[in-house]
Image (cartoon, helix red, strand yellow):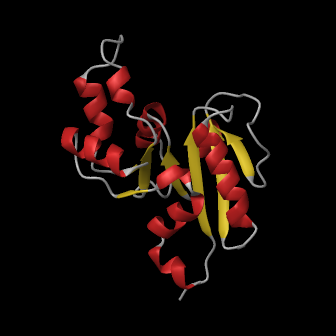
Amino acid sequence: MENKIKRLGFLLHDLSPSQISYQLIKTGNELLKTTDKIDLALFYRNFSVSVAEANFGTFTAYECFNYTGIVVATDLQGAANILKWPGPNRNKMYFYLNDLEWIRLRGQPGVDFESLAAVYLNPKLNIICRSETHKEIFESCWRKCAGVIEGGDVKQFVKLLWPESDNE
């Protein structure tokens, strides 16, 4: 068994007070107290004051452009971004469906079925839903999900992305 450090990054809109940024920082800090086998990073597209202090790296989205770890987008724009960006690990791209954004975007300029389908139906992007309810809704509208992670728990992301980690 390889004892390699696992690199995991999350791409967020910003780090301001929101459920997703708080949960990722909180559970990321908790996980890093128990292991040194994870290299965790948060990337943000818009600068803001952070909802909490992260005991790991936080970077602008520009740094994510060529990130060598697995990247998990947390919103539709982030998912569209990582699909276009180069990088050594772009065969392992994930979109954490924290919100059913497409429901609220109806009728907004520049948002149509084709632009949504380019992300939601892209086979390069593995979809992870935040709840069984989100999974049911997403799968009835788009396609099958790779899994469910309640509450944005970083430890659960590690278990899903590296199942062999359970033994470490």
Quadrant location of residue 137? top left
Q: What residue is at 56 percent from the left and 42 percent from the top?
A: 11
Q: Is residue 125 visible?
A: no
Q: Is residue 69 visible?
A: yes
Q: What residue is at 30 percent from the left and 53 percent from the top?
A: 145
> Looking at the picture, how far across and down is residue 8, in whole percent?
58, 58
> Looking at the picture, how far across and down is residue 65, in whole percent?
56, 43
Most distant residue in the bottom direction: 1
Quadrant location of residue 50? top right
Quadrant location of residue 27? bottom right
- Closer to us: 125 or 30: 30
Q: What residue is at 76 percent from the left and 68 percent from the top?
A: 33
Quadrant the C terminus occupies: bottom right
Q: Is residue 93 left or right of residue 30?
A: left
- Closer to us: 63 or 8: 8
- Closer to us: 114 or 25: 25
> Looking at the picture, how far across and down is residue 111, in whole percent?
33, 19
Q: Is residue 25 above or below residue 105?
A: below
Tally the numbered discs.
0
Q: Is residue 138 above or below residue 106?
A: below
Most distant residue in the front direction: 133
Q: Is residue 56 above or below residue 133?
A: below
Q: Is residue 36 above or below residue 21?
A: below
> Looking at the picture, how far across and down is residue 58, in whole percent?
72, 45
Q: Is residue 73 left or right of residue 38?
A: left
Q: What residue is at 67 percent from the left and 57 percent from the top?
A: 28
